[in-house]
Image: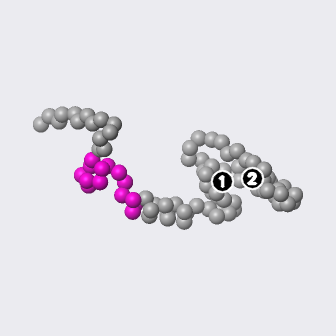
Amino acid sequence: MVREPVIKGDDEPEEDSTGNGGGWDSSFLADDAEYDDALRPQRLSEVVGQRAVVERLEVFLDATRKRNEPLGHLLLDGPPGLGKTTLASV
C-alpha cells in the first residue's frame, strides 16, 4: 500500500485521531503547570546545580540587604534549560 503525501495550507489546522485539531488537551497543560510549580525551588538554598551562580547571587543579595536597597538590575544569560527563569523567580 502506498501512502500519498498530504499537503495542507497554513490556514488549515492539522487534525489527529482525537479530533481536537492536533492541539494539546488543556487539562494536561494545567496539570503539568501544577507539578512544575510544586517542583520549583522557593529559596536559593533549594536550587540544585549552578553553585557558582547561586553563590554570586547570594553575594549580590547580601549586599543589597546591608544597604537596605533593592537589587538594581541583574542579567541572567545563557542557553535554554540552565534554570535562568527558575533563578529569577526565586
Q: Which residue is mark 1?
A: 88
Looking at the image, which residue sits at the far right? 67
Where 2 sits versus 23, above or below?
above
> Horizontal placement of 6 versus 56: left or right?
left
Q: Residue at x 75, y 48 (%)?
A: 73
> Horizontal placement of 39 versus 8: left or right?
right
Look at label 1 and name its amino acid.
Ala
**Residue 37 occupies quadrant:** bottom right
Q: Which residue is mark 2?
A: 57
Report helix, strand or loop for mark 1.
helix
Residue 67 percent location from the top left of the image: 87, 58
> Which span of residues is magenta-colored?
15-28
> Horizontal placement of 27 versus 34: left or right?
left
- How many numbered discs? 2
> Horizontal placement of 80 versus 3: left or right?
right
Looking at the image, which residue sits at the far left? 1
Q: Decide: marks 2, 1 in contact (CB < 8 A)?
A: no
Look at label 2 and name its amino acid.
Leu
